[in-house]
Amino acid sequence: HCRVASRGLAKPPDIGIGPGYAEDVAKLSQYIRTSLTDDRTIVAYDGMRLRAAFINSSNGQRWVALRRVKDKPPKLDSLGFPPALVPHLQKLGSRDGLFLVCGATGQGKTTTSCSLLVDYLERLGGVGFTIEDPVEYNLGGRHGDSGFCYQTDVRHDKEWADALVNGLRCHPRYIFIGE
């Protein structure tokens, strides 16, 4: 069965996986059991990028939650914000200060943040630096005429501070810290 995330329901529904997918599910299950050892990782499987999060239950069972992620974030104006809000969000890239993107799990915080960062780098230039666990979207490299992004993948709590210090040494205009 496949458990589907749904907002507002006390218990998410289980959806049966049809017999036509049994072989695919078996292959993916075998891949997970034999190849994935690290929690919170991005893996490539059958041409897809998947984010895997492991749950170790108190009864000894190990579950995995998979979510498909794209390679690049969508354009800012395609995220579904009211059209009048997009220019306001774009203007924030030329200001100084802290910008927090908050919300519930799975509601698009990383997608929004990465779309904003790419937009700022393409339009305004400068250096972006990300610290993530794990890196979801591939943002590294050149953006536009004068933007560039470095990405850091941290795995342990003690690495966050070192990654931030190293990031500050490259004089970034933008710093993105993702969970």
Image (tube, grey):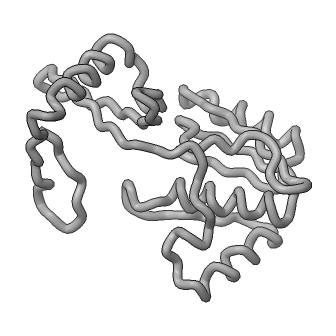
Residue 139, given in percent of the width and then of the height, sits at: 68, 44
| Residue at image point 26% right, 16% down | 30
Q: Identify the residue at the far top of this view.
A: 34
Horizontally, residue 59 falls left or right of residue 126, namely left
| Residue at image point 42% right, 37% down | 51
Quarter of the N terminus within the rendering? top left
Q: Is residue 41 visible?
A: no
- How many dots with numbers? 0
Residue 46, given in percent of the width and then of the height, sits at: 40, 28
In front here: 79 or 165?
79
Q: Is residue 27 visible?
A: yes
Q: Is residue 146 above or below residue 151?
A: below
Q: Is residue 60 above or below residue 121?
A: above
Q: Quadrant of residue 58?
A: top left
Horizontally, residue 142 falls left or right of residue 44, namely right
Q: Is residue 25 above or below residue 91?
A: above
| Residue at image point 27% right, 31% down | 64
Horizontally, residue 48 falls left or right of residue 88, namely left
